[in-house]
């Protein structure tokens, strides 16, 4: 039984795959740019108009059979937000930065103001990634290996 304590802190324990979510210091939020093969005129016409979620409340990476799942939760001012998505912004220096985008309802509704979104990741996509950053309008959270 004394060996179980060593496994609890090991990377082989699926609960320790990535650490706990930590707030991002404002200097760590600088996104890089990815080379684009899409013409700038197309991007201007098709820019994502959804706002960032006001507050990112939780972030975790869950291990799966063929990779992992990046799961983030956020808090909105009113209920009814929908069409949530984690949008990849940049991958650089072993870190992947995502924007947590949501669609605001046309009219406020009553109900819960929390929203959760997940992004499946293959082992190939996870290769070399040591940190995930998810940005909201008011804050960002990060998890690291």
Image (cartoon, helix red, strand yellow):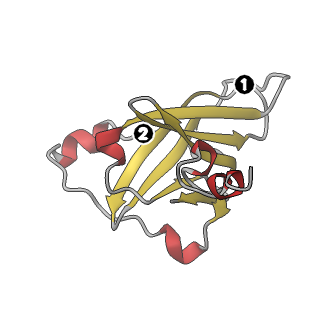
The structure residue drawn at horizontal position 75% and vertical position 34%, both measured from the top left corner, is 114
Residue at the far right: name it: 110
In the picture, measured across the screen, residue 135 lies left or right of residue 111, that is left
In the picture, measured across the screen, residue 144 lies left or right of residue 94, that is right
How far apart are labels 1 and 2 at the CA level? 19 Å
In the picture, measured across the screen, residue 48 lies left or right of residue 118, that is left
Above or below: residue 103 compared with residue 1: above
**Quick one: SS at disc 1?**
loop
Tags 1 and 2 in contact by the CB under 8 Å rule? no
Residue 43: name its quadrant. Answer: top left
Q: Which mark is residue 97?
A: none
The structure residue drawn at horizontal position 29% and vertical position 61%, both measured from the top left corner, is 33
Characterize the local packing of mark 2: few (<14), some (14-19) or many (20 or more) Cα atoms within 10 angstroms. Answer: few
Above or below: residue 61 compared with residue 104: below
Q: Please say whether residue 54 is visible from this viewpoint.
A: no
Characterize the local packing of mark 1: few (<14), some (14-19) or many (20 or more) Cα atoms within 10 angstroms. Answer: some
Front-lying residue, 130 or 49: 130
The structure residue drawn at horizontal position 20% and vertical position 44%, both measured from the top left corner, is 41
The structure residue drawn at horizontal position 80% and vertical position 22%, both measured from the top left corner, is 109
The x, y position of residue 133, in whole percent, is: 52, 57
The x, y position of residue 25, in whole percent, is: 61, 73
Above or below: residue 111 compared with residue 97: above
**Quick one: SS at disc 2?**
loop
Front-lying residue, 69 or 80: 69
Residue 116: name its quadrant. Answer: top right
Q: Which mark is residue 48?
A: 2
The x, y position of residue 24, in whole percent, is: 61, 67
In the picture, measured across the screen, residue 67 lies left or right of residue 22, that is left
Residue at the far front: name it: 1
The x, y position of residue 53, in whole percent, is: 63, 44
Q: Please say whether residue 5 is visible from this viewpoint.
A: yes
Write down the residue under mark 1: 80
């Amino acid at each position: 039984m004394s060996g179980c304590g060593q496994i609890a802190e090991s990377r082989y324990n699926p609960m320790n795959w990535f650490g706990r979510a930590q707030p991002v210091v404002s200097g760590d939020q600088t996104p890089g740019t990815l080379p684009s093969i899409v013409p700038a005129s197309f991007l201007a016409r098709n820019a994502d108009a959804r706002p960032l979620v006001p507050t990112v409340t939780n972030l975790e990476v869950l291990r799966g059979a063929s990779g992992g799942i990046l799961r983030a939760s956020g808090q909105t001012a009113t209920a009814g937000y929908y069409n949530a998505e984690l949008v990849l912004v940049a991958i650089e220096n072993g870190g992947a930065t995502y924007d947590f985008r949501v669609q605001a309802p046309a009219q406020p509704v009553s109900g819960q103001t929390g929203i959760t979104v997940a992004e499946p990741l293959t082992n190939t996509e996870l290769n070399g990634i040591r940190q995930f950053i998810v940005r909201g309008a008011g804050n960002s959270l990060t998890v690291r290996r």
